[in-house]
Amino acid sequence: MTKAVRIHEAGGPENLVYEDITVGDPGAGEVRLRQTAIGLNYIDVYQRTGLYPLPSMPGVIGMEGAGVVDAVGPGVTNLKEGDRVAYAMLVGAYAESRIAPADRLVVLPDAISDEQAAAMMLQGMTAQYLLRRTYRVQKGDAILVHAAAGGVGLIMCQWARSLGATVIGTVGSDEKAALAKAHGCEHPIVYTRENFADRVREITGGKGVAVVYDAVGKSTFEGSIASLQPLGMMVTYGNASGPVDPVSPMVLAKGGSLYLTRPTLATYIASHEDLMATAGELFDVVLSGTVKIEVNQRYPLAETAQAHRDLEARKTTGSTILIP
């Protein structure tokens, strides 16, 4: 038996149940992991509430973790017992031990700790595909990053600044503004007291930004569209304030022939080759010191419900991990 956090039905944080589960032996192409750190992400809230339903109930939620391979199934050649590995986008992370497909795990460099890995695989690979593939940020671009003091936000601010972009970001408080600024966000905007679209126009001399990266969703969509320059790209990749309402294509025409996309990390790392390339570029920027991964909150796995409450109340900054 091993401990895990499961939901028996969708709902609030009180529906997260810390209980015993049985984890068997790995099958063909699988390994068993003894997990050492688990990442907390907003997608976990979507699973808990039923916005992203689990395949079956009761189910273990969570999408990201790191640990050590302690058993290898038939046919696995890329991993061995004792390997330190990490992953993202594999449902079932909130557990002390789990089974995982070997081809979705990435072996960790010695210089990256398990806690760092659990804090950065999902958020860091999200930053990679957004900045390097969805809209490839160029030197001189002005960009807008919502939730700039969050996990993805802090990584994106550092990375985009290193690419030569002018980084504008929205945050909810002066404390978060200072944190974002320390991580490469040249122009933090406290959205609780300023109209961010108006400030973006001021900062850019009326031009607007080349791209908006928006994980907030419903409450920021209209302002984001208003912040874009002609031919700019609106990238809506999360729903922290709720899903965006249906949009008429004419909104994009009026904004100046804008582009709109709703990407997900799962698509960008669907192949083994893309997973390895994405993780590899993330490891490179972390190992070089270009991007620093900071674990700002740690909770015991047994206190996952409180971690969810704090995440939803926007009390967290940067990356958060659960410790089995």
Image (spheres, rainbow, N blue to C red):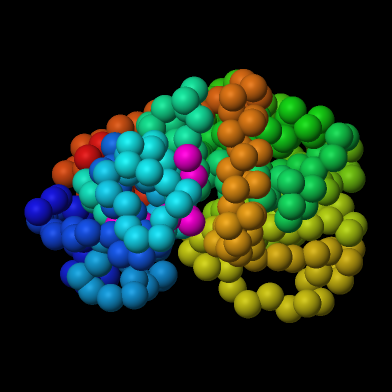
Q: Residue at x 90, y 57 (%)?
A: 230
Residue at 13 percent of width and 59 percent of height:
21
85 horizontally vs 266: left or right: left
Question: Between 88 and 211, which is closer to the camera in this rendering?
Answer: 88
Q: Which residue is rendered at x = 47% and y = 49% of the image? A: 78
Residue at point 19%, 53% (across, down):
4
Say if 62 sits above or below 202 in the image.
below
Q: Is residue 229 visible?
A: yes
* Image spot of residue 324 (x, y percent): 22, 40
Q: Which quadrant of the figure has residue 265?
A: bottom right
* Residue 304 visible to the viewer: no
Q: Is residue 309 above or below residue 153?
A: below
**How many marks can you see?**
0
Assess whether residue 51 is covered by the magenta stretch: no
Across and down, in percent, residue 228 comes to: 80, 53
Q: Which residues are magenta?
A: 99-107
Question: x, y (%) of residue 290?
Answer: 65, 24
Left or right of residue 289: residue 88: left
Percent position (x, y) of residue 150?
51, 39
* Foreground of the two, 282 or 199: 282
201 on left or right of 303: right
Question: Is 176 rendered above or below residue 10?
Answer: above
Q: Quadrant of the N terminus?
A: bottom left
Q: Is residue 103 magenta?
A: yes
